[in-house]
Image (cartoon, rainbow, N blue to C red):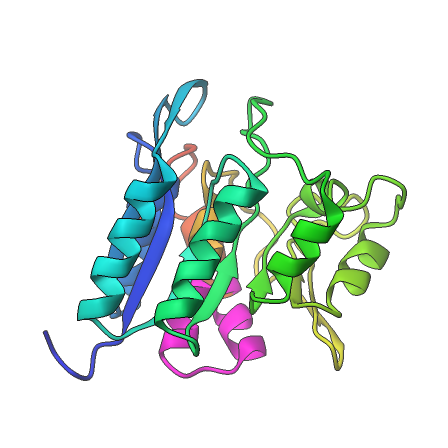
Amino acid sequence: MSENCPIVLTIAGFDPSGGAGVLADIKTFEQHRVYGFAINTANTIQTEKEFYRIHWTPIDFVVECIITLLNNYPVKVVKIGIVPSLSYLNEIILFLKKHSPTIKIIWDPILKSSTEFDFLTLSNQQILIDILKQIDLITPNFNEIRQFNLEEKNADSIASSYSHYCSVLLKGGHNPTEIGVDYLFTQKEACRLMPKETLLFEKHGSGCVLSAAITANLALEQTLKTACENAKTYTENYLFSNSTLLGYHV
């Protein structure tokens, strides 16, 4: 393995259609010229159009995989996708930080499938906040960020409040007033990321692609804002690649 090729890790679900989860992440990593490892948190039965079933990977198996990889390779950045609970996520982060204190962590909080199959609830705010303090970036969309605080209706306000704990990229695909406009909230500032394209096709797993692209860009030593901007461009090209729900990584 080339020493000039950064190593990144995705800890997420297996989607047999290849549109989301670890398969989509690895495709994205390859296009960014970083070397990707993958650990499955779940096996699913799904297509790009319908979700049928999920089988969770036991946390002890996931932890053993994490320890094995981090003991043998210099992983720079980790992306975490679908998990069944906050306690499960907390265990993952605990062992990531224990074995590599400087590792960067991105969490793409997948709370339900596009067909409304629920995966994760965020009812325990104290555990959630403790987790966010260990993470560098979360990448929720407008629907997902509202699940972080059910008492607040304004997505921007919720994202801004949680940016005290970690940076928040509020994805604009479900933005009701500015479709496609993302907002990056950090402890220091809020940045508006405008789309370069407006006529784009919907894609299954586009959020996975975006967060994986950010992961790769951070491993390539880009600043957080630049990593998000470049990842947005990559994702727009992915959305524009064809008119189906499964995109091409080119």
Where does the image place residue 179, in percent across and percent down from the top left? 71, 49
Q: Residue furthest left?
A: 1
Residue 127 vs residue 217, the one in the foreground: 127
Q: Does the magenta stretch include residue 225?
A: yes
Residue at image x 81%, y 50%? 155
Image quarter where the C terminus lies is bottom left
Can you say whether 30 is above or below 39 in the image? Answer: below
Residue at image x 63%, y 50%? 140
Can you say whether 162 is above or below 191 in the image? Answer: above
- Asked whether residue 237 is in view, the answer is no
Residue 38 vs residue 33, the one in the foreground: 38
Magenta part of the chain:
213-232
- Asked whether residue 90 is in view, the answer is yes
Residue at image x 73%, y 67%? 163
Can you say whether 53 is above or below 125 in the image? Answer: above
Q: Which residue lies furthest to the top in this view?
A: 52
User: Dominant secondary structure of the magenta stretch?
Assistant: helix
Where does the image place residue 83, in percent across and percent down from the top left? 48, 40
